[in-house]
Image (cartoon, helix red, strand yellow):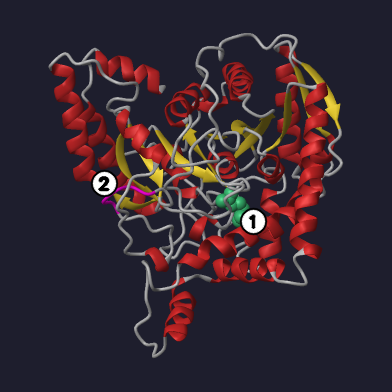
Amino acid sequence: MTIAEWRHKLRRGEVSSKELVQEKIKRIRALDPKVHSFLTIADDLALRQAEKIDQARSSGEDLPLLAGIPLAIKDNLCTKGIKTTCSSRILENFVPPYESTVTSRLWKSGAVLVGKTNLDEFAMGSSTETSAFGRTSNPWDLSKVPGGSSGGSAAAVAAGFCFGALGSDTGGSIRQPASFCGVVGLKPTYGRVSRWGLIAFASSLDQVGPFTNTVSDSAELLQVIAGQDPNDSTCINTPVPNYSENINKSIKGLKIGLISECFEQEGLSKVVKNTVLKAALQLENLGAEIIDIKCPRFNDGIATYYIIAPSEASANLARYDGVKYGYRSVSAETLAEMTALSREQGFGSEVKRRILIGTYALSAGYVDAYYKKAQQVRTLIRRDFENAFRQVDILLTPTSPTTAFDAGKHSSNPIEMYLADLLTIPANLAGLPAISLPCGFDKGGLPIGLQLIANVFEESRLLQVANQYEKAADVFKDSPKNDFVL
Ligand code: GLN
């Protein structure tokens, strides 16, 4: 069922929010020990929130859009009074004194927080294995990773622990786990959604977005979180359209471009390629025109990203110095030693690797050769997209070159892990909105994701095409079974 369908049931009193929340909490308690998608389960708070909504309904009050709907939040979004760890020892005991803009908008709309979800430490990773608090498993096959970094949110939605979740996407962290877990994941245009209260990784790339079961649910959550925020100067003051309005419109005559470079990748699995091409055919049957498009700089995305993102991370993570907040080493004798030891003990190895790369790339003598060059290539990648969108309305690629891989498979080889984001990173570098939605399964029954990319601020069109495909393909009605019957 979609969020809209639950809303009608809740409003008609056929089910109470308390019942919904109780059912989700029961499911989480019984099954999450297998998946480990949550770091914090907020049962008490959730039940209290739900009771409030139920009371408001029985006294005849007008209910907001998401009233009574249970949602999960990635643990790098600040929630006032609720631990927010970023899956890092350095923030293990951090209880934010304020609420992020996106979550406060959700609570204002009546949504209910069921818990905070696991991620790769500081959102750096593609498998949710670098979390300091243990890895998350893929609900479709517990021996596989759920993708990352928002693997906890993707797995929680796939396992039916909540109706939707928020994640963050710096280089693919919403779309790639959505693809691995068979759910819908949307990264909005850079600047569409406030980053205030999102613990910063790479500020020019980070964007918050929803995980949901369906495209129409995605439109609903985006509706609530999008829009200007005086606390985030990069969040743009343009009107937020009604995202649900056009999703049922026909896509007849729309031009959809297949990015040639994506389909020529060496590491692209055959079944992923064929399934995604079949999806393109289905879109053609719905009346879209399919065109091949060249984006010659597409493959330079990874190299560019792995200079820019670590550079920004090295600056953003300088604040964890053991002084202001977070973990402090007690074994040091001098201030400098205290800072060094706190960082050494508080950060995991992937985070340290990024800080080292970033600090190096920004240092005098190297900044022109690395950081500046990367920014120039970033511009070239953006121009490729600008050129593409002169010819087509939407671009289409696979979300990830493979389906979910075995836990541990790439853990000791960072380059292999980085390649998981080959197809998602360019949209972040260019600030474009992009969505991943399920389009089929491999032979092992693991979900395959289709990525659609639109021009800036064209989320409405993105959702329209995605929704038309979803309705025609019907893939989303499948859900993980074996281990998930209560
Ligand atoms: N996997 C990519 C990285 O490790 C992207 C992460 C993200 O989008 N937060 O940086």
CA neighbours of label 1 inside 10 A, class few (<14), some (14 to 19), many (20+): many
N-term-proximal mark, 2 vs 1: 2
Magenta span main SS: loop
Evaluate whether residue 481 shows in this view: no
Q: Tell me where residue 433 sits by quadrant.
A: top right
Q: Which residue is mark 2?
A: 42
The amino acid type found where label 2 is placed reads: Ala
> Which image quadrant: the N terminus?
top left
Residue placed at 71% from the left, 18% from the top? 283
Q: Tell me where residue 207 sits by quadrant.
A: top right
> Which image quadrant: the C terminus?
top left
- The secondary element bearing badge 1 is classed as helix
| Boundaries of the magenta span | 78-82
Quick check: 177 above or below 182? below
Nearer-the-camera pick, 142 or 358? 358
Residue placed at 65% from the left, 43% from the top? 428
Q: Which residue is mark 1?
A: 309
- The secondary element bearing badge 2 is classed as loop
In the rendered image, residue 415, in percent from the top left (x then y), is placed at 71, 62
Residue placed at 79% from the left, 40% from the top? 262
Nearer-the-camera pick, 332 or 289? 332
